[in-house]
Image (cartoon, helix red, strand yellow):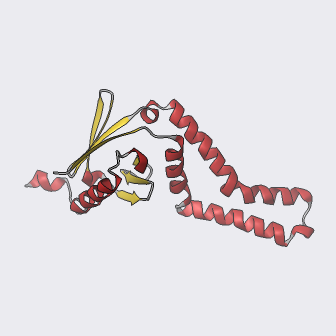
Amino acid sequence: MQEITFDVKLKTKDLFDYTMRHTYLSVSGVFSLLISFGSLVVCLVKFRDFQISTIGVLLFIALLFPVIQPALLYMKCRKQVKKSKDINEKLTYHITDELITVSQDENKAEIHWYEIRKAVYLKKAIYLYMSPVRAFIFPADQCGGKFDELVGLCRQSIEKYKDYEPEDEEHA
């Protein structure tokens, strides 16, 4: 049985990267960027035909999603990392091919691989989703030098349990 243990203390940048990816790789994220781009194009093409107030509104919309929203998300992530004990304290992960165990102080939770709905593997992190908005974030620089091994274990375990239904054991 493969086992990997490491500690994660999320930094603002780790949470911000996850939030940005989650926000902008959705349908609404892409749509919001298209609205901003469209506003900029309309402003540039029809610049001479518009009043100053209209130009101001179009420029605000053009900046809203690619500039303003990321700045607000960063501030929210910074605040969340500072204020939330669940995030700003060190989490210890013990990962095997059967379970993901996360502990913090005396608290401990076990998550089975079949509970993982989706996995995203990036150069700088792994995101293991338990729901559409809730995920474990494993930053590469905090995996104790075992990031590539962790990627392999996650891929193997998710593949192993991809068709698994917990009810199957109850009826056996």
Horizontal arrangement in the rendering, residue 166 relative to residue 144 (left or right): left
Is residue 135 among the parts visible in the rendering? no
Q: Residue furthest bottom?
A: 45
Residue at x-position 33% and y-position 57%: 148
Which residue appears farthest toward the front when viewing the image?
Answer: 145
Q: Describe residue 172's horizontal placement relative to residue 41 as left or right.
A: left
Residue 162, above or below 81: below
Q: Residue at left 69%, top 50%?
A: 68
Place of residue 114 in the rendered image (x, y in percent of width and height, measured from the top left) = 25, 54
Q: Residue furthest left?
A: 172
Would you say 93 lies left or right of 135 here? left
Q: What is the x, y in percent for residue 57?
A: 81, 56
| Near-viewer residue (10 or 141) | 141
Image quarter (top left, top right, bottom left or bottom right) of the C terminus: bottom left
Find residue 9 and report its horizontal and vertical position in percent. 43, 37
Q: Quick one: which residue is furthest to the top in this view? A: 106
Residue lying at 58% horizontally and 60% vertically, measured from the top left: 29
The answer to whether residue 26 is above or below residue 135 is below
The residue located at (53%, 32%) in the rendering is 82
In the picture, residue 123 is in which quadrant?
bottom left
Could you tell me residue 19's position as x and y percent? 52, 50
Residue 123 shown left or right of residue 156 in the figure? right
Count of numbered labels shown in the rendering: 0
Whether residue 68 is situated above or below residue 79 in the rendered picture? below
Residue 34, by quadrant, is bottom right
